[in-house]
Amino acid sequence: MTGLLLAEGERHRQQRRLMNPAFGPAHVRELTGIFVQKANELARFWQISVARDREMAPIDVLDGLSKATLDVIGLAGFNYDFDSLSLDGQKNELNEAFSVIFGYGSSSASFFKLLRVLFPPLRYLPMPETKEVRKAHSIMRRISTRLVHEKKDAATHKQGEVHQRDLLTLLIEANIDLNLPESQRMSDEDVIARESMPKVHVIEYGSSSNGRGAYVSQVQHSLCFSDTKSRSFLVAGHETTSSATAWALYALSIEPDMQRRLREECLALATDDPTMDELNELPYLEAVVRETLRLHPPLNNTVRETVKDDIIPLSKPYVDVRGKVHDHVKIDKGTMVQIPIMAVNRSKAIWGEDALEFKPERWDKVPETAQRVPGTWANMMTFLGGPRSCIGYRFSLVEMKALIFTLIRAFEFELAVPKEDVTRQNASVQRPILRSAMDKGSQLPMLLKPYQRT
């Protein structure tokens, strides 16, 4: 089984063509109702939490956003409701399994997992969570297999709903299309791998067929903010989208004038259930999302391996330690090349001296230097570019807009800690974490005040 992430050449192009319709504008337009539904559920979840606590205790907005985006992934991905925002706190079987797999414990635990990737002998040391992780994998595989078989049977015999809009159904329907050549079809096992079973064992055990577990694990957890396969989108997507949205709320919480301006724009749209087109027509919301993803990309960097010898010309020559001037870089086949997403997004040479500032208004006039950045969206590297760029970037953008639109209309956001206390967790996804509570893992505590509309 070779997923979209690892497939090369014609195999990659075939898989991409098969999956493209599920991530196109028309289908994302249909899914927008799910984004808005879960955004409203999160708003109600927080409203009840605030009402219960008269002392206005901080709320971890990252945790709530992660719950909402996981629910979105379940419904939009394979029509399964994780029900993460249940008020009784009870988790269904698959939700519990995902909590085990994607639970990021203490920083020391995450560091030990990284050591196991970098130093293979450590993989054989017993870890207390190994049995629990294996059980979670078993549950995920059992349920994902059932979902694939049920949807394939329904699609083949035209059973069930007349039209299901989840991505798994679309992929299965495309895969069994009589006009699709047999050579381009995927087996049930392939569909399960792409749509349901995350290859999390790369993170847990550091194993991969090419021996480069560290690189593979880093890329796989990037969801669609880098080149991903569908399975990464469906099971890890909530981490990147929730993190990006949390950073947006962070930026708005320390810039109250920007927060008020955005709220006024969103409230001017007289609906709690906006369409994709309505969300995309809000200019300041667009600017806030762009600036968030420029300044706070969920993925710091990614890695590519060269498939042949090449020479890369440089826009600006450099002088080495021996005083020799170079106007190109020679790259040998098999070289691992790091793509510094955040460094490009924050480069003063590209974005100006204010590149490290959160300024949505910069998008009123994009610098000419930024217009040369070969990103697939908005002159930035957050979604990468080219044939291996993010296949689901439209999905992520509209989901993020739906969340911000709904939440900024419902609450006034204020940081519950000094802004200097908030930093980035050094992990595959750049989640917020507190310097004063590194051992408690990623979090973003805020004070939420329900907004009273006049």
Image: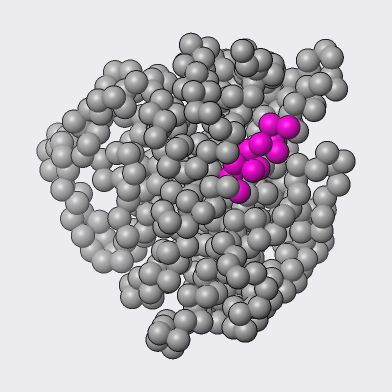
Judge whether residue 255 can be spotted in this image.
Answer: no
Quadrant assignment, res 368:
top left
- Closer to the camera, 307 or 199? 199
Image location (x, y in percent) of residue 225: 46, 47
For residue 37: magenta?
yes
Q: How many marks?
A: 0
How is the structure coloured here? one colour
Tell me what residue is drawn at x 81 percent, y 21 percent: 51
Image location (x, y in percent) of residue 363: 31, 27
Q: Is residue 375 left or right of residue 451?
A: left
Which quadrant would the C terminus be assigned to in this image? Answer: top right
- Above or below for 442 versus 437: below
- Closer to the camera, 121 or 62? 62
- Above or below for 55 versus 98: above
Tell me what residue is drawn at x 58 percent, y 25 percent: 408
Q: Is the stretch drawn in magenta largely helix, strand or loop?
A: helix
Judge whether residue 230 can be spotted in this image.
Answer: yes
Specify start and end residues of the magenta stretch as a single range: 34-44
Image location (x, y in percent) of residue 330: 20, 54
- Closer to the camera, 155 or 309? 155
Tell me what residue is drawn at x 45 percent, y 38 percent: 278
- Above or below for 438 versus 139: above
Tell me what residue is drawn at x 32 percent, y 60 percent: 387
For residue 375: magenta?
no
Image location (x, y in percent) of residue 203: 62, 55
